[in-house]
Amino acid sequence: MSEKDEIKLFDDIREGILEAQREMLMRKAKLGELVVVADENGVPYSISADEALRLLDKSSFDK
């Protein structure tokens, strides 16, 4: 596998993971559920799925 093929593969995997996360957060948001996330120090805390979805969307636009 060439380096170019590997880069494409990893990009496809990354996109698939982001899509799966977004779908999970959308389901949880519809049910009004919380999700557990970690801060920059690795300390876990709970936020609403709505807020997590906003953070995911914001981080996607920042890249």
Image (cartoon, helix red, strand yellow):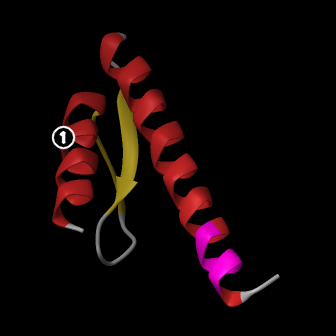
Is 49 drawn above or below residue 30 in the view shown? Answer: below
Q: Which residue is mark 1?
A: 54
User: Where residue 38 appears, x then y in whole percent?
Assistant: 36, 61
Residue that appears at 53% across and 60% down? 14
Q: Please tell me which residue lies in front, 51 or 26.
A: 26
**Quadrant showing the N terminus:** bottom right
Residue that appears at 58% across and 58% down? 12
User: Helix, strand, or loop for circle 1?
Assistant: helix
Q: Please tell me which residue lies in front, 55 or 9.
A: 9
**Quadrant showing the C terminus:** bottom left
At label 1, counting other C-alpha atoms closer than 10 Å, the crowd grade (few under 14, some 14-19, many 20 or more) is some
Residue 35: quarter of image: top left
Q: Residue furthest top?
A: 31
User: Where residue 2 appears, x then y in whole percent?
Assistant: 75, 86
Residue that appears at 17% across and 65% down? 62
Is 24 drawn above or below residue 44 in the view shown? Answer: above
Is 40 drawn above or below residue 19 in the view shown? Answer: below
Left or right, residue 45 beside residue 10: left
Q: Please tell me which residue lies in front, 43 or 26.
A: 26
User: Taken as a whole, is the magenta stretch helix, strand or loop?
Assistant: helix
User: Where residue 15 appears, x then y in whole percent?
Assistant: 50, 53
Magenta-tinted stretch = 4-8
Q: Please tell me which residue lies in front, 15 or 37.
A: 15
Q: How many numbered marks appear?
A: 1
Instruction: Report the amino acid beneath label 1.
Output: Arg
Left or right, residue 7 beside residue 35: right
Residue that appears at 54% across and 66% down? 11
